[in-house]
Amino acid sequence: MELEQIKREIVACVEERRDDFIAIAEALYRNPETGLNEVRSAALLTGFLEREGFRVDRGLAGLPTAFRAETGEGGPVIALIAEMDALPVMGHACGHNVIAAAAIGAATALRRLLPPAAARIVVLGTPAEELGIGKVEMINHGTFAGVEFALMVHPSSRRYVIKHYLGLARVCFTFFGKPAHAAAYPEDGINALDGVIQTFNGISALRQQLRQDVRVHGIITEGGVAPNIIPERAAASFYVRADDLEELERVKARVIACAEGAALATGCRLQVDADPRVLAPLKVNRAFSSLYSAQLAWLGLQESESRADKNKGSSDIGNVSQIVPTIHPHVPVGDGINIHSEAFARATVSEQGRAAVVEGATALALTAAELVARPEIREEIVREFSS
């Protein structure tokens, strides 16, 4: 079957099965599970894939809900990423139900229409994206071994082919002081909360000398037990973000220096806990993104005109993009509705949210079919990735 015919068949297949794929998104929406607790979600996805004929391995990388489902025997190894965790309280306010349904839909169409020898199609169930650990652990444990290209879509208020993501490092500070009665014997105390407050003040001053892409934000996680007791212990948690890993490490070191200076100034003892699981920035692959963009044009869809780099977050898909060519385009579920809101969660199961599942599944499958059929495109993507 020629490529154009395969693409037409993909569109028809996704349309024929659209109710099945939308049902996945709606089931996940009704039963949201937070990171590392996606038991029913993973069971739903793996059960569907097994019924479709995929070989499924569960409980990978020490994560009970991580899975790898595979079909095919030869050709390029193409991974479709299925996130599935929800947010506390808000449920699927980041739209991972749409992500999973689109990945499943694309994989189902590709299994039906590609000969087994043409490619190996892999669905990777990646838990705990909101915690920033799922894909990192799966990479570290070799779950991505052999994957040559990685694809996923993310719901958004707009349609974007390229959306930039910042790297992210997490660091926690615990200050230890000495308790005393705050009114009767203040001279006997060492105020751990002062150490935290001075850390915030130092970081606020540091922001004057930071690049435009850098973000530092934190919260006080522990601040004492009563106003009349000088706090013996206080703690704060910070996120540091930047466009590249070198700047990320440089700024993280300066943030730690702010805490060390605060400890010295207040007489506190400081404990620094830096999470070694750093989220990498998304490594954009223009050739790969252009291939996806061409599929949108083939479908008669246009990318949104507003800037996709204005508002940047972070995601562990960035770590995947550092080891294999990756795309992470956005599909629209509702104009003007921002992620991590209850309105966005509802939008994922609206009429436009259902359309986003179909668009994502179709565009991902079309892009994968082009990768399989056009070795020169694969070479161009790999060449850019390696440069």
Image (spheres, grey):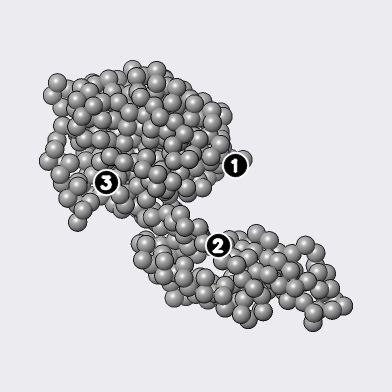
Amino acid on which disc 1 is placed: Pro
- How much space separates mark 2 and mark 1, taking CA atoms? 24 Å
Dot 2: element: strand
Q: Residues within 10 Å of mark 2 (few under 14, many from 20)?
A: few
Who's the residue at 13% across and 24% down the image? 2
As rendered, which of 243 and 256 lies closer to the eye?
256
Between discs 1 and 3, the one toward the N terminus:
1
Would you name the residue on which mark 1 appears?
Answer: 88
Q: Quick one: label 3 or label 2, which is nearer the N terminus?
A: 2
Percent of width and height locating residue 16 = 33, 17
Viewer-closest of 23 and 120: 120
Label 1 secondary element: loop
Tell me: 289 left or right of 89: left
Q: Position of residue 281 (x, y in %)?
A: 37, 55
Q: Which residue is mark 2?
A: 273
Query: Nearer the N terminus, badge 2 or badge 1?
Result: 1
Q: Looking at the picture, which amino acid does disc 2 mark? A: Asp
User: Residue drawn 41% across and 66% down?
Assistant: 249
Label 1, label 3: how far apart the Cα atoms are: 31 Å
Q: Is residue 97 visible?
A: no
Quadrant of res 71: top left
Kindly identify which residue carries mark 3: 325
